[in-house]
Amino acid sequence: MCLYFNTPESLLFARLEARRCLKDVEPRLFADDGGPDRGEVVEVYGPEGTGKTELLYHLLCRCVLPEAAGGLEVDVVFVDTDYSLDMFRLASVLDSGSAGSDDAVLRSCLSRLLVVRCSSSSQLLLTLHFLETTLSSRPRAALLLIDSISAFYWSDRSEAASVAKQEEKLSRCSELLGRLLRDYRITIFATCHPIRRGSNGPPSSSEADRSHLCRAWQRLVTHRLVCSRQEAQHNPANGDERSGEQRNWQVFTVHCSSWTGTRGSRVSSFRVTDGGVEFIWTPRPPPDLSAVL
């Protein structure tokens, strides 16, 4: 009796077909029809305080929310290397995105999220080794979030005797990520911090080269979101210009560059509210953003 259709290979092909494409995860961030496809990597780059984590919460919620609420209804694996994931904040954003649905909807959304925490590059390496089992058992898992891929740069540097040794673990992590991208056709979003901290504006041209990350990682990246922080804008509270009350809104800018599929770039701006990220219209790129290009 022929058992061809029950082989592991045929099951793997079935899982690949089930993976959800995330090109429409957030049209306001990416150029027209230029969102990340299966097997692609988005690097979210910027100094601390430029809205990267809130942007990740927004994208995460877009993925786990049900289709009836405008979400994609897929599973997400969140690798937290910075120990910065705030579940209360995430639940608040989810609750806002689901228009105040009942607790059962919120629990359903959270059931689509798997959180893994790592405190060293060795732990990250082991985590990526075991992710293959997770992806095999969760065919609806379409997104891997890593916050951040550069978390262990300084610790690896202090332990290494040479640049090659310093980059060895991240290179191996990148190789494993490349295999997961190839075999399971997931999409990856990963944050990346500049080496030098303390600047709230756009990264300098040397920082924008992200030379502190190994070439193996750089070869994986197909889209790049460069985050920066603008000066706080003074706006009328609740949109009522007749009101004497004023509120300062912190505005963040994201410059998206894509090197695959529909190549192009786009500049978006958003502010962070109690309910999460709120995109606002930007008539032109900030004049100092050219340093990043």
Image: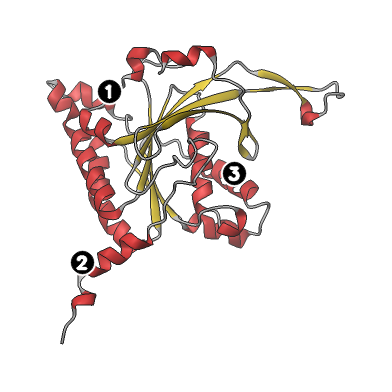
Q: Say few, some or many: other residues with alpha carbon within 10 Å of mark 1 (under 14 / 14 to 19 / 20 or more).
A: few
Q: Answer yes or no: do the residues labelled 1 and 3 have beta carbons within 8 Å?
A: no
Distance CA(mark 1)–CA(mark 2): 41 Å
Circle 3 residue: 93
Asked whether the viewer can see residue 199, the reply is no
Report the quarter where the C terminus lies: top left
Which label is found at residue 154?
1
Q: Secondary structure at mark 1?
A: helix
Q: Nearer the viewer, residue 233 or 17?
A: 17
From where the camera sits, is residue 150 visible?
yes
Q: The residue under label 2 is which amino acid type?
A: Glu
Q: Real-space Cα distance between discs 1 and 3?
A: 32 Å
In the displayed structure image, the side of residue 144 where residue 268 appears, left or right: right
Q: Position of residue 288 (x, y in %)?
A: 50, 12
* Mark 2 residue element: helix
Residue 113: image tag: none
**Which quadrant of the structure image shows residue 251?**
top right
Residue drawn 65% across and 59% down? Answer: 102
Residue nearest the viewer, comparing 44 with 154:
44
What kind of element bears circle 3?
helix
Q: Position of residue 126 (x, y in %)?
A: 23, 46
Give whichever of discs 1 and 2 has the lower sequence position.
2
Among the two numbered marks 2 and 3 on one chain, the one whose residue lies closer to the N terminus: 2
Mark 2 or mark 3: which is in front? Answer: 2
Between label 1 and label 2, give the one nearer the viewer: 2
Above or below: residue 47 compared with residue 181: above
Which residue in the protein does label 2 denote?
Answer: 9
Mark sitting earlier along the chain (1/3) = 3
